[in-house]
Image (cartoon, grey):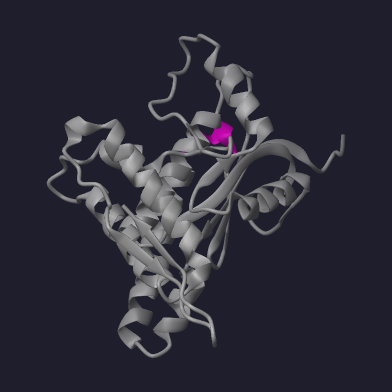
């Protein structure tokens, strides 16, 4: 084993649509100011501080690269008895939810465990390459778990210890067999909050994504996935009295001499 690399939990998160948001802001000083305030005041001072406000044994490192964030931390406490995989999953869920609530954007990413070198200035290693590749393969707006991370998670979940509590949130298995972090479930915990209607904002963000997909066929699969994910949650929780996303038509733009393709979600 290399003396430089260390075995760590690694998350690679990508804010989808952030580049397009920046491009649109070129003609809007107000939008530019909103983005600046969010990045400098909110993201730096609140979100990243929150994600880094963990016991020093985690040795958390965070690197912000425009619309992507890399996070790594130790997999266990120094005595090897307290697992930190639940902590990383929770922090990523919080980040994913806050990005959607504050910017109306979705996050795609991946969690893994492996060899990496990560400090305040530099990050590289096989685990970063793996996390980056998995993030791209995730396809939809979801944060997926690698096989190695899932194996660690399941192993820890079978362990009983008075030194740590089992998580309140569990990964959800998708249609393709991949497991991902269930951020709608997290938002549902705050459905009765008098301050922010998180589920309502997520629903509105999905509708906005569908509207964008009508002019950009590259977004159709993402929009359909979001609709099915949200509606599956609604159907699984009838006692929440939430409305399904229904009768949404996603029509791709026409090419010359080609009929439009329509997708009706009912």
Residue 55 highlighted magenta (yes or no):
yes
Farthest-out residue, right = 1
Image height check: is 155 above or below 194? above
Q: Position of residue 228 (x, y in %)?
A: 39, 47
Q: Which residue is at the front of the view, 38 or 250?
A: 250
Farthest-out residue, left = 194
Q: Is residue 89 visible?
A: yes
Q: Which residue is at the front of the view, 200 or 157?
A: 200
Classify residue 99 by image quadrant: bottom left
Q: Position of residue 35 (x, y in %)?
A: 38, 73
Judge from the rendering whether residue 49 lies leftward or rightward of residue 233; answer left or right: right
Instruction: Name the residue at 32% across, 66% down.
Output: 208
Judge from the rendering whether residue 144 lies leftward or rightward of residue 201; answer left or right: right
Judge from the rendering whether residue 62 lies leftward or rightward of residue 199; answer left or right: right
Q: Is residue 118 visible?
A: no
Judge from the rendering whether residue 229 lies leftward or rightward of residue 239; answer left or right: right
Instruction: Name the residue at 46% across, 75% down.
Output: 260
Q: Position of residue 143 (x, y in %)?
A: 52, 45
Classify residue 229 by image quadrant: top left
Instruction: Name the residue at 52% across, 38% down.
Output: 175
Farthest-out residue, bottom = 27
Instruction: Name the residue at 44% across, 29% down.
Output: 170
Image height check: is 38 above or below 259? above
Image quadrant occupied by the N terminus? top right
Q: Which residue is at the front of the view, 138 or 126?
A: 138
> How many numbered marks, from 0 up?
0
Q: Which residue is at the front of the view, 49 or 8?
A: 8
Residue 265 highlighted magenta (yes or no):
no
Classify residue 90 by image quadrant: top left
Part of the protein shown in magenta: 54-59
């Amino acid at each position: 084993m290399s003396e430089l690399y260390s075995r760590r939990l690694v998350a690679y998160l990508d804010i989808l649509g952030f580049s397009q948001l920046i491009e649109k802001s070129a003609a809007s000083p107000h939008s530019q100011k909103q983005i600046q305030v969010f990045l400098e005041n909110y993201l730096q001072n609140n979100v990243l501080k929150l994600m880094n406000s963990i016991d020093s044994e985690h040795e958390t490192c965070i690197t912000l690269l425009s619309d992507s964030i890399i996070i790594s931390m130790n997999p266990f406490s120094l005595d090897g008895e307290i697992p930190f995989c639940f902590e990383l999953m929770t922090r990523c869920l919080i980040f994913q939810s806050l990005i959607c609530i504050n910017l109306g954007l979705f996050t795609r990413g991946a969690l893994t465990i492996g060899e990496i070198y990560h400090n305040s200035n530099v990050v590289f290693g096989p685990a970063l390459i793996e996390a980056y590749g998995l993030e791209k393969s995730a396809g939809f707006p979801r944060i997926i778990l690698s096989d190695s991370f899932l194996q660690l998670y399941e192993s820890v979940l079978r362990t009983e210890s008075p030194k740590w509590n089992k998580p309140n949130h569990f990964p959800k298995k998708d249609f393709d067999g991949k497991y991902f972090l269930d951020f709608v479930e997290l938002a549902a915990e705050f459905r009765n909050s008098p301050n922010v209607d998180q589920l309502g904002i997520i629903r509105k963000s999905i509708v906005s994504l569908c509207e964008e997909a009508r002019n950009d066929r590259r977004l159709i699969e993402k929009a359909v996935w979001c609709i099915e994910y949200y509606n599956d949650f609604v159907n699984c929780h009838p006692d929440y009295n939430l409305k399904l996303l229904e009768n949404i038509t996603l029509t791709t733009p026409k090419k010359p001499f080609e009929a439009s393709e329509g997708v009706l979600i009912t």
